[in-house]
Amino acid sequence: MKSIPLRDIVQQIGGRIIHGSGNPMMMNVIDWSKKEIDDHTLVFHLDREPIHGKYWRVYQSVAIISDKPDFCMDLEDSIILIQVEQVEQAYEQFVQYYRNLFPIPVIGITGTCGKTTTKEMIRQILDEEDFTVTATWRSINGIWDNVEYLLEIDQHTDVAVFEIPVVYPGYLGTACRYFQPQIRLLLNIDVHHLAGCETPEEYMKAKAEIMEGIDPESGVLILNDDDENSKKVIDVSGLQQVVYFGKTDRSDFRAKNISYADKGMNFELAHQGKSYQGYVPGYGEHNVYNALAAIAAVSRIGVEIETALHRLAGFEQVEEHLEVKTGVNGCTVIDDTWNSSPLAMATALQVLKDISQGRKTIALLGYMPQLGESEYALEQYAKMGEKAVETNLDLLIVVGEEAEEIGLSALRQGMNEHSVYFCENGSQIYKILEPHLDENAMILLKVTYRVMMRPSFQSLKSKLIPHQRQAGTDGQ
């Protein structure tokens, strides 16, 4: 965080100092009084829990912003108390004030799938071009993390890249107000987060919040021209800078001649009458779409296309995102266990089919936490069973009661009952897999990390991929 004089902040939020004095430099911000504190910390009293200042006596220059000053007791002389009319409003005002201190390019990325990978592609391209980049970490993009990421921007930051999801209506709009991205990417819209959005239509509309607050003249909106759902909810009329990527003739960044290559994808990129040869590590056509979106974004910051393609050729694939690994006895394991949605599961099954080349294909498919338990969720699980049959799986292992409909649907579609298993733990799964573990087997792990963190599944993964670092070790 950039250091800011306290009185500048008080002025911006319309506060009034009622205890203590001075104008210390504030270097940290917390939004919950029970969080760890440090010297020169600004505390927004959002939880409105009693604060006993005597416990903070060892810290210098602590300032509390509260609309419940009576809840702030035993304040030492070093603690400054600022009263505001409404602390949530003051918090929003501070966030907007801090964001506006930095006239730098900010890129916001949303989509049902591909956010983390595209963000990492952009970050790695910019890092190698000597930009100082602030970005979301891995796939950690919750709404309570937004301000922490925003405060990582300081006077040394050249570009910020944030992935911003949808969990419920208003979630994405709030993130857009916080980050105020001038460059916005919408990768795709499928079905997800039905636990927070009651219907697929509501989820789609929530994704359209990527438009909230965009400047019609200077704002840049980058869209997937091959995604039909995006076209249903995004109105680009009035926007002067809309950029399309995809395989269509209208695409500003157009991919042609996409093919599988060694550990990745080859493609031809057409842009403004010129053609470029590209390669990106990681299997699947979706990865080419991610690359197109990343190139479109960095080109707005001045990175040449040839340079971006060169950097992408050395892209370090995100862990547990369709990572292809050599497993026990020479089998191949596709580790796609970070999270799961219908689009991501269907994509993973397609990649398994595309790279199998006649080998035995086995898929472990589990529940998708953000889908919830509605009738719409059940429909999506049934579609995954249909996709499993469509991709000609040799063996389907359904993990967990919540995902049972995947297997039942596959059976209704005619899959052999001796090829479908329903399991609850890693030990059961390993007994089924063990006879098949040889060089002829390709195994897809599409079981969300919430399940994979359980001990029996950690054991299963260590048996399937003996040399992999397990959760809790360095690098995980």
Image (spheres, rainbow, N blue to C red):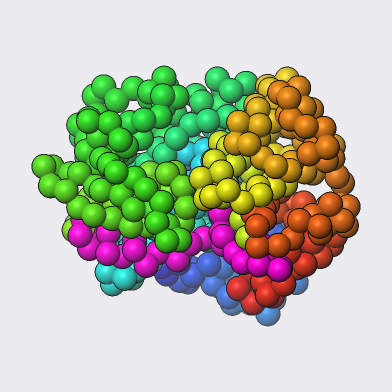
Q: Is residue 185 above or below residue 320?
A: above
Does 233 sit above or below residue 119?
Answer: above
Judging depth in this view, the residue of 340 and 108 nearest the camera is: 340
Quarter assignment of residue 253: top left
Residue 309 among those drawn in magenta: yes
Please report the bounds of the magenta region as a residue range. 305-331
Q: Position of residue 409 (x, y in %)?
A: 74, 26
At x 73%, y 43%, the residue is 395
The image quadrant that residue 390 belongs to is top right
- The residue that appears at 56% across and 68% down in the rendered structure is 41
Which quadrant does the N terminus fall into? bottom left
Q: On the rendered structure, is 380 left or right of 172?
A: right
The furthest residue to the bottom: 58
Relative to 96, is 296 on the left or the right?
Answer: left
Q: Quadrant of the rendered structure where residue 332 is? A: bottom right
The x, y position of residue 209, in whole percent, is 45, 31
Instruction: Measuring from the top left, give residue 85's x and y in whole percent.
Output: 57, 41
Residue at x-position 30% and y-position 35%: 247
Residues 88 and 271: in front is 271
Number of marks present in the image shown: 0
Q: Is residue 3 magenta?
A: no
Residue 111 left/right relative to 327: left
* Residue 196 or residue 247, whichever sits in front: 247
Instruction: Check the picture and name the quadrant holding the C terminus.
Output: bottom right
For the point 53% across and 67% down, the residue is 28
Query: Can I make out residue 326 in this image?
Result: yes
- Above or below: residue 407 compared with residue 162: above
x, y percent for residue 38: 61, 73
Residue 69 seen: no
The residue closer to the viewer here, 287 or 192, is: 287
